[in-house]
Image (cartoon, rainbow, N blue to C red):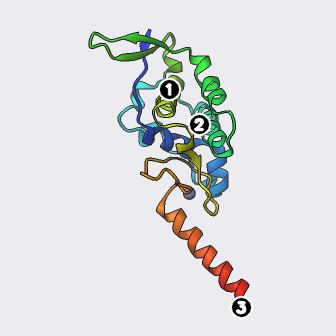
Amino acid sequence: MVTVPRVEMADVLELVNTYGRVPRATAQDQGEGYPALSAVMADNAERFPGTELEHLQALADEAYQVFAAAHEGGDVADRVNALLAPASPTPTCTPECGIEWEVADAADALRAALGVALLDFLHTRGAERLGTCKGIRCADAFADLSPSGRKLFCSSGCLNRHKVAEHRRRAKASA
Ligand SMILES: [Zn+2]
């Protein structure tokens, strides 16, 4: 059995938004290439073997579905379970009585790590804190850690571009 490395939500987002076909197509920057996993998940990349680009894209697309379902009010649990199922992570109790997940095949470690990170986030914070950006030419996944929990944009850059566009639209409408 292989221990599934713990990954932070920030790493999940980085992976989903770097390799996911929807975020990249929406940003129209697929032509700019795809960095190696080591550039995306600095601390963990070497613990995930078998990470060819096609595999990363497919996994990112599956994980993105969780954020898209949260955004649309769809079945988030279904998407997380679909992500986890092929890896069949098994919970084990550590000597310190913590939870550690294991997979039979090291090639499934990244899938399991993404699924477990999303599962952890969902049961501690809830699906309403995951979503996809409403920004202009942006569909990036985000996790909302703000006190209000009403985030609609992935970044302040996207929020500001949206505000400027809204301002222009109103100015035009009243002219
Ligand atoms: Zn955005």
Neighbourhood count class around disc 2 (C-alpha, 10 Å): few under 14, some 14–19, many 20 upward: many
**Residue type pointed to by label 2:** Ala
Looking at marks 1 and 3 on the same chain, the residue that comes earlier in the sequence is marked by 1
Q: Residue 69, how many percent across, how many down?
A: 66, 39
**Residue type pointed to by label 1:** Leu
Which secondary structure lies at badge 3?
A: loop
Neighbourhood count class around disc 1 (C-alpha, 10 Å): few under 14, some 14–19, many 20 upward: many
Q: Nearer the viewer, residue 35 or 24?
A: 24
Ligand 1 image position (quadrant): bottom right
**Which residue, given by chain and number where applicable, does mark 3 sit on?**
175
Q: Could you tell whether 77 is left or right of 35 in the image?
A: right
Which secondary structure lies at badge 2?
A: helix
**Residue type pointed to by label 3:** Ala
Q: Could you tell whether 162 is left or right of 103 in the image?
A: right
In the rendered image, which quarter contains the N terminus?
A: top left
What residue occupies the far front of the structure in this picture? 148
**Which residue, given by chain and number where applicable, does mark 1 sit on?**
110
Q: Give me the residue at 56% from left, 69% from top.
A: 161
Q: Residue 23, how many percent across, how many down?
A: 62, 49
Against 116, residue 17 (above or below) is below
Q: Could you tell whether 76 is left or right of 110 in the image?
A: right
Against 18, residue 32 (above or below) is below
Looking at marks 2 and 3 on the same chain, the residue that comes earlier in the sequence is marked by 2
Q: Nearer the viewer, residue 109 or 146?
A: 146
**Which residue, given by chain and number where applicable, does mark 2 sit on?**
60
Q: Give me the residue at 47% from left, 34% from top.
A: 121
Using the numbered discs, state the Cα–Cα distance from disc 1 to disc 3 in whole angstroms.
54 Å
Q: Residue 156, how many percent across, how many down?
A: 47, 63
Using the numbered discs, state the Cα–Cα distance from disc 2 to disc 3 in whole angstroms.
44 Å
Q: Give me the residue at 62% from left, 28% from top.
A: 77
Q: Nearer the viewer, mark 1 or mark 3?
A: 3
Q: Establish whether ligand 1 lies closer than 8 Å to the Cβ of label 1.
A: no
